[in-house]
Image (tube, coloured by chain):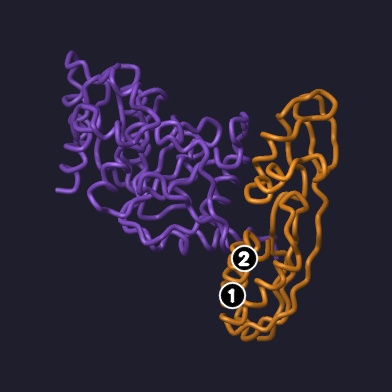
């Protein structure tokens, strides 16, 4: 399953990075640092491939740095905090959470009290942490 | 630099191929928004317009039941490619949650909404109809924030309770300079002058759709829905809007 959801997110990253570069007066982007939340289960190889392909269309030749953020949940009812375990989901649920992470509320429940009312404290999606370049 | 959500910058790009975006909204639930949104999409598609339907009721989607699209699933090709149901490009949260309840709080609703907008690759469409949840909550506010070129089609019933909330919705949309196409009276009984009430608000009254007991039996069968008196009354209104 190569370059599926990752492609759409890579387009978003490059589009945003080029807007940042324009705003900051950067003539050349040299590095884009992306925080990748574990919950979305991004295939980093596919993501890197898509980023490289799309950035060439924008004449961008940048290094991509990824920081994986662990996904953690906190129950709004009993306060229990627990980590995301992708192996606790079946293949269809994993795919659904990959596409729209909020779907986790349909498939995951607090292991202590059974409530689906929890907060995704960290590791939800994809964020641009920094864009470096030359003026 | 603060961390940036990259999804926001591609939403305009994803919606670019769409000529007209119409949000079907109301203050109250149970007035027939989903049925009007889905049937309008069917009517437009039948007339040869390229049409999409996006169900934005993330916690209680129902348009899949109207369209008989319970087993539909999108293609995934560089994003989410909507499946075609009865000639309509269709996207709903139900693709991903199935028959499971998906309880979501405000921030989760916003996040799901942004994800859907950022990922869905619509074709070149004449119309994208948005089936919105009731009320003046997160989805309406997100719609106004995230989608430019948005037109609102407001649905009410002849009940004073429904009209009360519709007045508030119209006031909100007005204050935010959001274009309102007009108001449809659904489940009309002919006993209360919704037209007069709406026109007092300097808003276009588009027409009334009488109660049609047959519509329940047509749910899940788009061809049957198009033959109901509900659909025929709605088709007259849809035609009058374009005129």
Q: Quadrant of residue B165?
A: top left
Q: Residue B190 appears at what percent x and percent y?
A: 17, 17
Looking at the image, can residue B177 be seen? no
Q: In the picture shown, does residue B4 fall above or below A60? A: above
Q: Which mark is residue A18?
A: 1
Q: In the picture shown, does residue A57 fall above or below B30? A: below
Which class describes the residues within 10 Å of circle 1: few (<14), some (14-19), or many (20+)? some
Q: Residue B41 appears at what percent x and percent y?
A: 32, 43
- The kind of secondary structure element at disc 2 is helix
Residue at image x 29%, y 16%? B159
Q: Which mark is residue B225?
A: none
Q: Which chain is purple?
A: B
Residue at image x 44%, y 57%? B122
Q: Chain of mark 2?
A: A
Spatial separation of the CA atoms under disc 2 and disc 1: 16 Å
As drawn, is B132 to the left or to the right of B231? Answer: right
Q: In the picture shown, does residue B72 fall above or below B63? A: below
Q: Residue B207 appears at what percent x and percent y?
A: 18, 31
Residue at image x 25%, y 20%? B212
Between A17 and A109, the one nearer to me in the picture: A109
Q: Chain A appears in which tint? A: orange
As drawn, is A79 to the left or to the right of B30? Answer: right
Q: Which mark is residue A7?
A: 2
Q: Quadrant of residue A52?
A: bottom right
Q: Chain of mark 1?
A: A
Between A15 and A116, the one nearer to me in the picture: A116
For marks 2 and 1, the one nearer the N-term is: 2
């Amino acid at each position: 399953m190569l370059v599926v959801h990752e492609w759409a997110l890579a387009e978003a990253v490059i589009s945003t990075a080029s807007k940042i570069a324009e705003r900051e007066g950067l003539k050349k982007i040299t590095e884009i640092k992306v925080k990748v939340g574990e919950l979305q289960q991004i295939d980093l190889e596919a993501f890197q491939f898509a980023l490289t392909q799309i950035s060439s269309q924008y004449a961008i030749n940048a290094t991509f740095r990824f920081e994986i953020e662990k996904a953690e949940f906190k129950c709004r009812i009993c306060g229990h905090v627990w980590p995301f375990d992708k192996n606790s989901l079946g293949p269809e649920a994993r795919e659904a959470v990959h596409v729209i992470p909020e779907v986790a509320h349909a498939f995951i429940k607090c292991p202590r009290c059974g409530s689906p009312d929890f907060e995704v404290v960290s590791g939800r999606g994809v964020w641009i942490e920094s864009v470096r370049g030359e003026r | 630099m603060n961390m940036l959500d990259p999804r926001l910058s591609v939403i305009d790009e994803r919606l670019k191929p769409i000529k007209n975006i119409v949000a079907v909204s109301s203050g109250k639930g149970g007035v027939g928004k989903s049925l009007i949104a889905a049937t309008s999409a069917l009517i437009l598609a039948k007339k040869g317009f390229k049409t999409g339907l996006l169900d934005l009721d993330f916690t209680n989607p129902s348009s899949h039941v109207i369209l008989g699209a319970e087993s539909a699933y999108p293609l995934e090709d560089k994003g989410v490619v909507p499946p075609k149901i009865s000639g309509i490009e269709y996207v709903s949260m139900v693709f991903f949650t199935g028959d499971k309840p998906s309880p979501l709080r405000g921030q989760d609703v916003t996040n799901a909404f942004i994800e859907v907008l950022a990922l869905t690759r619509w074709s070149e469409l004449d119309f994208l109809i948005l089936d919105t949840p009731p009320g003046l909550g997160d989805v309406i506010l997100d719609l106004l924030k995230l989608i430019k070129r948005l037109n609102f089609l407001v649905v009410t019933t002849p009940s004073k309770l429904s009209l009360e909330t519709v007045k508030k919705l119209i006031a909100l949309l007005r204050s935010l300079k959001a274009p309102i196409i007009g108001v449809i009276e659904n489940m009309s009984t002919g006993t209360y002058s919704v037209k007069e009430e709406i026109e007092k608000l300097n808003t276009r009254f588009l027409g009334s759709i009488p109660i049609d007991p047959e519509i329940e039996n047509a749910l899940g069968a788009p061809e049957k829905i198009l033959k109901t008196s509900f659909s025929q009354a709605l088709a007259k209104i849809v035609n009058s809007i374009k005129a």
